[in-house]
Amino acid sequence: MTIGDHLDSLYGLPAYLFPPAKAPKDALPEPDGHAWRIASDIYDSGEPWESVFARFCADVDTTRVRALIVGAWSDAYDSAPTAVVEALVAAKDRFPALRALFIGDMVMEECEISWIRQTDLTPLLAAFPRLEEFGARGGTELAFPALDHSSLRRLTLETGGLPAEVVRGVGASDLPALEHLDLWLGTPDYGGDSEVSDLEGILSGARLPRLRELALRNSEMQDAVAVAVAAAPVVARLEVLDLSMGVLTDDGATALLGGQPLTHLRKLDLHHHYLSEPVQERIRQTLATAGVEVDLDRADADEDEEDDGTVWRYVSVGE
């Protein structure tokens, strides 16, 4: 599967695309009523992203803007958003109300998720200390060195392959307000070179005292992740555990069921899985009957078997 739809909301606000320069000059909505999507044409640099952003800053009362979505920038498959980050950091004083920021909202027709080139995005978190939500799409060249941020409540990194250094950087960060963490770990084919040991800082929960929703998904090593989660200290205080979109088999699910109790969860999301019906029934009997909402939709998890018996299984989003 690939990404086929742009974000439709951010920070609880509906997304609104800031019009291109040649569009009719219609009245713009209230600045604080939408998540503003700023984008340029990925294949036509007639108006670079920075120019669109400059028009936006001129036409909209940015002091009231609460959420920004960075869409395509020119040649995103070949160029990191360095200028985008610099423009946002330079304009930080113009956005005192900004609480949510997403970088790289592109669909497959613009740039496949594994083709999106990223950069070190932590200067944005440093520039906006009152951000409550931060997300990014694309893992190529993505960097996330350890940081301190006292306001961030939601962090999402969507990739076909998340670099191990990023996983370790998140785990080493002090994020005392973080309630929701969503990491798409991906596969080695697309740069996802992390191992379960890289998750130690996250699974210990030591720097994440308020974490209530944890998603470690879209992973080729989903069984190993499930084994680690089964004994992870952070799980005891979670309300939602999401191990979906990956290559989860009976081995991983059995280890999860054999670990610490999960009946305190409000929801366990395992959609897109490779579980047998007997193991699915064990999960239902153990958790669903205890009041846990369990998502066992197999979705598009198809497997291929070669003539020699080799079975190929795939994560949900890789390209």
Image (tube, helix red, strand yellow):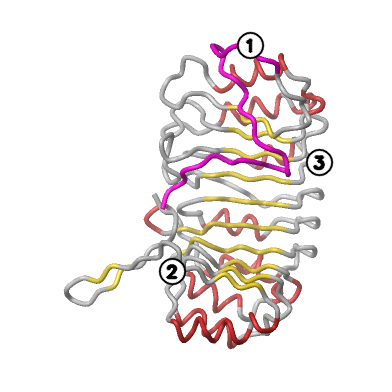
Q: Earlier in the sequence, mark 1 or mark 2?
A: 1
Mark 1 or 2: in front is 1
Q: Position of residue 132 (x, y in %)?
A: 77, 46
Left or right placement of residue 78 versus residue 137 in this view:
left
Q: What residue appears at the point 72 percent right and 46 percent down from the top-left corner? A: 133
Distance from the alpha carbon under mark 2 to that under mark 3: 37 Å
Residue 9 falls inside the magenta stretch: yes
Residue 203 pos. (x, y %): 65, 70
Look at 55% across and 38% down and name the residue there. 105
Identify residue for label 2.
Answer: 247
Q: Which mark is residue 130?
A: 3
Q: Secondary structure at mark 2?
A: loop
Q: Residues within 10 Å of mark 2 (few under 14, many from 20)?
A: many
Image coordinates of residue 87 in percent, x first then y, are 65, 25
Q: Residues within 10 Å of mark 3 (few under 14, many from 20)?
A: some
Query: What residue does disc 1 label?
Result: 25
* Pointer 3 or 1: first along the chain: 1
Which structural element holds mark 3? Answer: loop
Q: Position of residue 205 (x, y in %)?
A: 72, 68
Quote the CA–CA distance across marks 3 and 1: 32 Å
Question: Of the residues shown, which amino acid type is indicated by label 1?
Answer: Lys
Q: Which range is magenta?
A: 1-27
